[in-house]
Image (cartoon, rainbow, N blue to C red):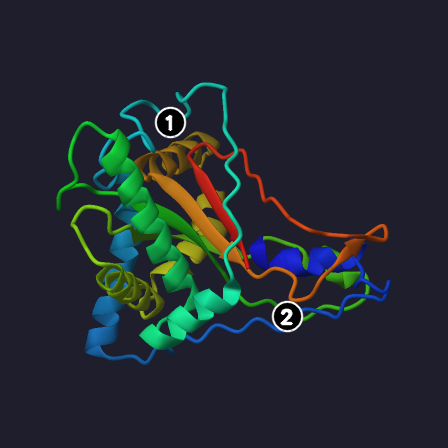
Amino acid sequence: DGLSFATAFQGFTTDLDGNPVPPPAPFKRKERSFVPSVTRMFDLVSATASVLTLPFARRDTPTILRPDSPLGAHGPDRTIVAIPEVSLSLVKSTKNAAGVSVNDVLLAAFSGAVKRYLDAVEATPSGPNRRIRALMPVAFPRKKQTGERRWSAGVANNWSFASIPLFVGEDLSRSQRLKKTNEATTKLKNSPAVPIQKIFQDVLYNMLPLSITRNVCADLMGGHSVCISNVPGPQMPLAVAGKEVVAVEVIYPNVIPQVSLLR
C-alpha cells in the first residue's frame, strides 16, 4: 500500500552522497476513540449499514470517466497522464491558511479539475444532480519493523477503501469546494465506517464464495468514477545506482481510472 512506498524506497535508493536513506517517520492517525453512548451506537449501526449497502448504492452519473457500460468494458487501450509537479510548500500554505489537511487541498483541487474537464467535453451540463464519487484508500498504522521483518511485515497491504464525494455538480468557488471537501473528509474520519469496512474485507469476505466477493467488488468499483490516493514520498533527493531520481510515476492498471499523487 501507499505507506509501504516509503519503506520500499529504502531498499534500493540512497541520498545523493551514497548514504543510506533514513527510515520514514512513524505513521499516526488521529481519530475519535469509540465511547459507548446512544449517539455513538447509532453511528456504529448507521456506518455498518452504509458499508453493507455501498456496493449496491446508486451508481455515479455516466460520464467520460465512468461510461454507462459494464465494468471493464472500456477496451484494452489505456492512457497514462503525468500530472505536472506542484510545489508541496504551496499546498501546505494553502492548507494552513484554510485550516484543513493536505489531503483536503489535493482532493478539492482534483475535484475542480474534473469539473472543468467534464464541463468542457460533456454534452450534458453540470448540475446539482451530477453524482461523482471517488474510492480513496485509507491506510492503517502498522508496527515499526526492523531487519528482514521490514519486508515481510513492513511492506504490505493494510488499508481499506472509503467512498468520498467529488463536488463537481454545483458552481463553487475554490474556497467553497475546499470547505465542502473538508466537511466530507472530517465526517468520514469521525465515522467508524472505514474500520468496519476493514473488518468486513479481512474477515467476512474471506468466508463468502469467490463468486459473491467478485460481484461485490465489481459493483463497488463499477459504481464509482475514479480511485484517488495520495501517499507520502521521499522527503529528500534520492539516487538509484548513483543517478539522481528526477521523477517518479505511480502506474496502476486499474479497472476504473486511477489517480495517484506522490507527495
Measuring from the top left, give residue 81's x and y in whole percent. Answer: 50, 37
Circle 1 Cα neighbour tier, 10 Å, few/some/many (<14 / 14–19 / ≥20): some
Identity, as a three-letter code, of the amino acid under mark 2: Lys
| Relative to 169, residue 100 above or below | below
Position of residue 213 measured from the top left corner of the image (x, y, whole percent): 43, 37
The type of residue carrying mark 1 is Leu
Tag shown at residue 24: none
Rendered position, 240 above or below 88: above
Dividing the picture into quadrants, the one containing residue 115 is: top left
Quarter-of-image position of residue 250? top right
Nearest to the observer: residue 10 or residue 140:
10
Left or right position of 99 against 126: right
Instruction: Give the mark count.
Output: 2
- Which residue in the protein does label 1 denote? 71
Q: Gap between marks 2 and 1, in whole Å?
A: 36 Å
SS of the residue under disc 2: loop
Residue pictured at 25% horizontal, 71% vertical = 41
Q: Position of residue 259 (x, y in %)?
A: 46, 44
Residue at 27% over, 25% down: 68
Q: Mark 2 vs mark 1: which is more N-terminal?
A: 1
Q: Is residue 142 left or right of residue 146?
A: left
Residue 99 appearing in the image: no
Q: Is residue 36 visible?
A: yes
> Quadrant of the image for the C terminus?
bottom right
Tell me where residue 110 appears, x and y as whole percent: 37, 50
Q: Which residue is mark 2?
A: 143
Hey, which residue is sitting farthest left in the picture? 128
Between circles 2 and 1, the one closer to the viewer is 1
Helix, strand, or loop for circle 1? loop
